[in-house]
């Protein structure tokens, strides 16, 4: 499977929602909904687990539709934040405090 990077540096192609959608795997959708419901204290249903990647026009997990970094990347017409002239901005820097692995991904993109 091709590696797909989200606006914020998460690897969409490693995401359980993305994988469940691409593989049309209802069992993985169910497992992911249960896992994420427990982790995030939310009521996530297996029918919520559908995503073709955050930067696509297709179906996305609900959080991806609301993501400030995604909206900014679209407005700036860049594939991801690592390709933005303002990288790293405060929004993405704040995000890195919770997801430091995303910084490694975007820093590498910025270098290339």
Image (tube, rainbow, N blue to C red):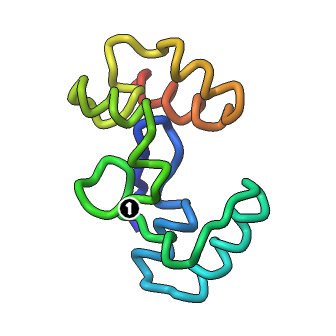
In terms of depth relative to the viewer, which is nearer, 10 or 50?
Answer: 50
Q: Position of residue 23 (x, y in %)?
A: 44, 82
Q: Which residue, given by chain and number where applicable, does mark 1 sit on?
A: 2
| Vertical arrangement, residue 36 with respect to residue 73, above or below | below
Which quarter of the rendering shows the C terminus?
Answer: top left
Q: Position of residue 46 (x, y in %)?
A: 56, 78
Q: Position of residue 95 (x, y in %)?
A: 60, 28
Q: Residue at x 40, y 27 (%)?
A: 81
Residue 33 left/right relative to 66: right
Residue 18 left/right relative to 112: right
| Vertical arrangement, residue 93 with respect to residue 52, above or below | above
In terms of depth relative to the viewer, which is nearer, 48 or 51?
Answer: 48
Which quarter of the rendering shows the N terminus?
Answer: bottom left
Q: Residue at x 52, y 67 (%)?
A: 17
Q: Residue at x 29, y 36 (%)?
A: 79
In terms of depth relative to the viewer, which is nearer, 63 or 52?
Answer: 63
Secondary structure, mark 1, is: loop
Residue 61 left/right relative to 100: left
**Which image quadrant is residue 33 in?**
bottom right
Q: Residue at x 57, y 67 (%)?
A: 16
Local packing at callout 1 (Cα closer than 10 Å; few below 14, some 14-19, many 20+) is: few
In terms of depth relative to the viewer, which is nearer, 7 or 35?
Answer: 35
**Which image quadrant is residue 71 in?**
top left
Total marks in image? 1
| Vertical arrangement, residue 62 with respect to residue 26, above or below | above
């Amino acid at each position: 499977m091709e590696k797909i990077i989200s606006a914020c540096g998460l690897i969409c192609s490693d995401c359980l929602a993305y994988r469940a959608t691409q593989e049309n795997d209802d069992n993985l959708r169910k497992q992911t909904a249960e896992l994420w419901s427990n982790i995030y204290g939310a009521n996530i249903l297996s029918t919520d687990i559908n995503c073709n990647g955050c930067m696509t026009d297709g179906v996305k997990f609900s959080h991806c539709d609301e993501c400030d970094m995604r909206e900014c990347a679209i407005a700036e017409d860049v594939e991801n934040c690592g390709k933005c002239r303002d990288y790293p901005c405060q929004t993405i820097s704040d995000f890195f405090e919770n997801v430091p692995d995303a910084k490694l991904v975007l820093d590498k993109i910025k270098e290339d």
